[in-house]
Amino acid sequence: MFQIQLKDTVLDLTTPQVMGILNATPDSFYKESRLEQLDQAVNRAHNMVIAGASILDIGGQSTRPGAELVTESMEIERVVPIIEAIHSKFPEMLISIDTYNSKVAQAALTAGASIVNDISCGNFDKNMIDVVVANHAGYIGMHQTGGPENMHQVESRKDIMQDLIDYFNYKKAAFGAKGLKNWIIDPGFGFSKSIQENFNIVKCLNQLKPIGLPILLGVSRKSSIYKTLGVDANAALNGTTVLNTIGLMGGANIIRVHDVLEAKEAIVLVNQINA
């Protein structure tokens, strides 16, 4: 059983939870996830809450291959009004800020977020962990290699699972020394990995359990799914649900998705199987 302290509340991961994706960007790879109006963001958040999301993940920088990098000020301008509006409408809802910039994280936490979802696991901004600890925020750290400009470049490696185990054990010790003991790991499906490595991560997810930290799995509508199926992101929901189900069977504690209802149903059914 995992419990993650988030400011003045606790994220209980006794049963797997759903994180709904809200993209405050004009160029995210899945068009239907893009938000252009504030009321649209609040309405979509409302629908996700009704469907069963426990966390709403809001990002202002697209991380799709070839995405334009925006300034910190632009990122803040995109996400803070949405966070403030959703936090005002749903004050008990957990909000995550999807960013690798500590200044964006601080602005988002001040606006009402309580979790930082950092795809760089502290590699892109040396101040990130200090900001998380100072704000008593939750933290999600993802595995990837390279920098902001080449985070999707695939490196040659022998064993992706061993690389992940070594990486997160190293980060666990480093973050622990800074005062961050309990946080969430994300193996980084779709980031700097081959298609086969992505599928191996889902297949072997339980190998990460001995690290002793909760696991987030984010496969939703990604290219490894739709390229394998010969479709596009719009037709990748069924494939997403299949991989989410396998990941849940392997011990995923959070699944990050565009489609909350289907993810919630997968959790209910897997819980029934495991009962």
Image (cartoon, helix red, strand yellow):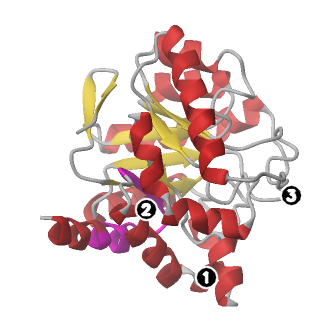
Quadrant placement of the N terminus: top left
Q: Residue at (75%, 53%) from the top-left corner?
A: 158
Viewer-proximal residue among 197 and 248: 197
Give the distance between the C-alpha atoms of the residues marked 2 and 3, in whole angstroms: 26 Å
Q: Amino acid at mark 2?
A: Arg
In contact (CB < 8 Å): disc 1 and disc 2:
no
Q: Amino acid at mark 3?
A: Gly
| Residue designated by label 1 | 234
- Left or right: 194 as drawn, with respect to 82: right
Give the distance between the C-alpha atoms of the residues marked 1 and 3, in whole angstroms: 19 Å
- Specify the segment rendered in magenta: 253-266
| Residue designated by label 2 | 44
In contact (CB < 8 Å): disc 1 and disc 3:
no
Quadrant placement of the C terminus: bottom left
Viewer-proximal residue among 117 and 201: 201
* Crowdedness near tag 2: few (<14), some (14–19) or many (≥20) residues, C-alpha within 10 Å: some
* Crowdedness near tag 3: few (<14), some (14–19) or many (≥20) residues, C-alpha within 10 Å: few
User: Is tag 1's residue or tag 2's residue first in the polypeptide sequence?
Assistant: 2
Viewer-proximal residue among 210 and 219: 210
At mark 2, the secondary structure is helix
| Residue designated by label 3 | 66
Answer yes or no: is residue 49 visible.
Answer: yes
Above or below, comparing residue 148 to residue 43 in the picture:
above
Q: Amino acid at mark 1?
A: Asn
